[in-house]
Image (cartoon, helix red, strand yellow):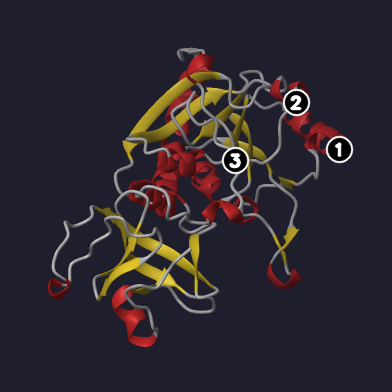
């Protein structure tokens, strides 16, 4: 098939690679403009890097809807379909109606749940048992198009990076497997039930702030959902402490102090109730959070056993 590919982050790269591997003619790759990165260095998107490697011309308009020259090139190519994966701009009807078969999006959730910019993180945050990939034919709404294919996977104890990498590979295969049925007219298009829709808004750094007044299970999901970005964090002695791995544990029944138990019944939230090489136990609104991997500013991520060798953190200290 003659395709135009639209995408920007590393999540989209395996999809582009798979389409090329399957022998499709990718005429153009449309991606976000090069941006200033760390220390002002101009960097291009991962998708552009992949396109350049394969010798495919890239189009990088600041606003595609206003980019007459780029749209002219796309139209002249006469694509059968446009494949979109985390491109980062809304497509208007002019683009949506350009290819004969339509524009098809690889969305990282089981639609209609978690429409929006951060579906993988919000699926973890919400305690979903499963997530997956939905291939949909795009319309002018926000992830509202008819569904063409779905595949799911269990979340379990996976963090965002685990889910991101798994769904990226899944989306690549599912999109490539679905295109022949789209081309032949064999695909079935299933409308979404808008009454079942939920939304996954874009994240900010502030979303990573941990509130120990919450339930330990919810905080565990927050930590997993925000690894590696923006990272879950709290304050410890006026220093930002990032928490990368933890588990929710139940409070132990009251014991004699000499037994060394971790008691959090009627203890202020955010209080460290136990410290050993296996973890730092922190009281929460419900249950305890056992921290097993953490990081101070300017330092590497480290296990608790390594952390306590060079840092003073004791029972009774407060995280907030």
Where does the image place residue 41, in percent across and percent down from the top left?
73, 69
The residue mark sitting in front, 2 or 1, is 2
Q: Position of residue 172 (x, y in %)?
A: 46, 39
Label 2: few (<14), some or many (≥20) within 10 Å? few
When asked about the image quadrant of residue 200, the answer is top right
Q: Describe the element under mark 1 as helix, strand or loop.
A: helix
In the visual, does 196 lie left or right of 312?
A: right
Quadrant location of the N terminus?
Answer: top right
x, y percent for residue 308: 33, 81
Look at the numbered discs 3 and 1 and tell me whether their residues touch, using CB distance below 8 Å: no
Find the distance from the CA under tag 2 to the CA under tag 1. Answer: 16 Å
Q: What residue would you read off at disc 3?
A: 86
Q: Nearer the viewer, mark 3 or mark 1?
A: 3
Whether tag 2 and tag 1 are in contact, CB under 8 A, the answer is no
Q: Secondary structure at mark 2?
A: loop
Sequence-wise first label, 3 or 2: 3
Comparing 292 with 35, the one in front is: 292
Q: Is residue 81 above or below residue 286?
A: above
* Residue 79 position by quadrant: top right
Q: Is residue 67 visible?
A: yes
Mark 2 highlights which residue? 92
Residue for badge 1: 69
Q: Give the secondary structure at mark 3.
A: loop
Relative to 102, say whether 232 is above or below. Answer: below
Q: Quadrant of residue 262?
A: bottom left
Q: In the picture provided, is 94 more to the left or to the right than 125?
A: right
Q: CA distance from mark 3 to mark 2?
A: 16 Å
- Residue 158 x, y percent position in the rendering: 34, 49
Say left or right for 32 vs 268: right
The number of numbered badges drawn on the structure is 3
The residue furthest bottom is: 310
């Amino acid at each position: 098939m003659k395709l135009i590919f639209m995408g920007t982050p590393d999540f989209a790269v395996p999809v582009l690679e798979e389409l090329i591997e399957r022998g499709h003619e990718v005429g153009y790759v449309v991606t976000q403009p090069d941006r200033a990165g760390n220390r002002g260095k101009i960097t291009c998107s991962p998708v552009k890097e992949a396109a350049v490697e394969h010798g495919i011309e890239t189009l990088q308009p600041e606003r595609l809807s206003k980019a007459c020259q780029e749209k002219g090139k796309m139209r002249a190519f006469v694509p059968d379909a446009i494949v979109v994966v985390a491109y980062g701009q809304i497509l208007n009807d002019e683009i949506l109606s350009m290819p004969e078969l339509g524009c098809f999006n690889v969305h990282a959730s089981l639609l209609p749940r978690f429409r929006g910019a951060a579906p993988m993180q919000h699926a973890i945050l919400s305690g979903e048992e499963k997530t997956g990939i939905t291939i949909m034919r795009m319309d002018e709404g926000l992830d509202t198009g008819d569904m063409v294919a779905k595949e799911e996977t269990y979340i379990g104890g996976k963090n965002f990076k685990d889910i991101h990498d798994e769904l990226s590979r899944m989306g690549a295969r599912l999109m490539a497997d679905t295109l022949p049925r789209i081309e032949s007219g064999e695909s079935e298009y299933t409308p979404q039930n808008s009454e079942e829709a939920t939304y996954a808004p874009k994240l900010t750094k502030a979303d990573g702030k941990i509130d120990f007044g919450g339930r330990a299970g919810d905080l565990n999901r927050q930590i997993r959902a925000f690894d590696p970005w923006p990272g879950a964090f709290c304050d410890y002695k006026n220093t930002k402490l990032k928490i990368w791995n933890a588990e929710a544990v139940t409070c132990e029944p009251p014991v004699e102090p000499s037994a060394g138990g971790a008691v959090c019944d009627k203890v202020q939230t955010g209080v460290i109730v136990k410290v050993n090489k296996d973890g730092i136990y922190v009281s929460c609104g419900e249950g305890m959070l056992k921290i097993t991997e953490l990081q101070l500013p300017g330092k590497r991520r480290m296990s608790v056993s390594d952390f306590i060798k060079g840092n003073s953190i004791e029972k009774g200290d407060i995280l907030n």
